[in-house]
Amino acid sequence: MTTSTTVRKRATGSLLGLALGDALGFPTEFIGVPKILDWYGPWRAMELPEPARVSDDTQMTLAVGRGLRAAMDRGLLTPQGLEEPLRKEFVDWYRSPENNRAPGRTCLEACGLLQSSLPWQDASQIGSKGCGANMRVAPVGLVPGLSEEQRAGAAQLQSALTHGHPTALAASDLTAHAVRLLTQGAEPAALVGLLRAYAVDNRSRYHHRWLGDLWTRSQDPTPEHFIARGWDECLGVLERLQEALRDPAPEADPCLATGAGWIAEEAMATGLLCFLLFPDEPVTALRRAACSSGDSDSIACLAGAFAGAHAGADAWPTAWADRIEYQGELVTLGALWDQ
């Protein structure tokens, strides 16, 4: 880890950026771009709402963060060591009175089943590749000291507890990998190429140790065939992202280029697009993501996670960071992983 990586407080920056993007995009979700502009004015001047309340995206990110912290407090990160605290955190979220921020149906159905003694693979929604798993995976990319196998396995396991579709697994893995690359100082211009190479390398790698027999719930003939479907969809959307960046259109709705973000691979790509259009203007990236026709809060929280991992905690206006909901817990987790 370089000195600049430490000084920038990239983990704190990523978590704050995720929550700020979430709060900025939460009011604009389900609204078309013309109406957003009509209600909120020019997108480059969008202000953080008052109060700065977040959606289930940030709540579930914190659940993943707490689960990771609990698992690693006990020693080496293992599938069994992570599953128990993650399952507990997801069930606690499901039962919480604060779970009233437009949560996704897949998360609700799976977390309801996780309350029982069922194997988690039977709770997993194998047909769902909604964005609810990869918008919460950033902590897996921020925790220092993991091997590549641990990071990939943890990213896919936290997805699989609710979203078992292979594309949800692959997109979560890619999102965590992108966050990790940015915390390590990767250049934004090189990011898409690095992610494509990672996807190709992992295309037929099924993490048996972390996923068990999840693949048998699908119609695929082998675990390798199962996971390759997910990586192929991610490779497809990365091609669309590369194409969009060859001829950037910063004033256009980003969803027109890489998708509306309701599904995992599109949320990842459109969040990345907003960040990569403005790699040195993190607040502008958030505003572009929030002023979009699709799943605005999930797109903006991913854009914020990427931008904060790149630029660090000082990227965000103090007046915004100081009043974001859950600020204390976000900063505490970030400080733990910035050490």
Image: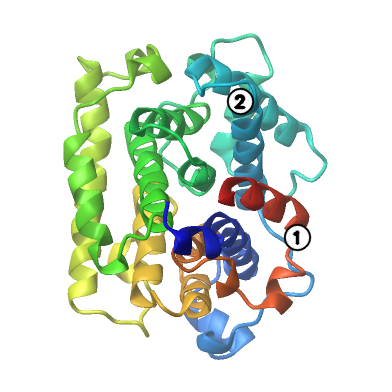
The percent coordinates of residue 179 (x first, y second) are: 42, 52
Say above or below: 163 vs 315: above
Residue shown at 58%/39% (left/top)?
105
Along the viewing direction, whichever of 180 and 138 lies nearer the viewer: 180
Residue 145 image offset from top left, x and y in percent: 46, 36
Residue drawn at x 19%, y 57% as measured from the top left? 193
Colouring method of the image? rainbow
SS label for mark 2: helix
Image-quadrant location for residue 246: bottom left
In this image, 282 relative to 114: left or right? Answer: left
What residue type is disc 2 on?
Ala
The residue under label 2 is 71
* Residue 93 point in image, percent of width and height: 72, 36
Q: Name the N-terminal-most of marks 1 and 2.
A: 2
Residue contact at pointers 1 and 2, CB within 8 angstroms: no
Can residue 146 be spotted in the picture? yes
Horizontal placement of 196 versus 78: left or right? left
Q: Which residue is mark 1?
A: 325
Q: Amino acid at mark 1?
A: Glu
Q: Residue at 52% across / 41% down in the picture?
A: 143
Q: Quadrant of residue 54?
A: bottom right
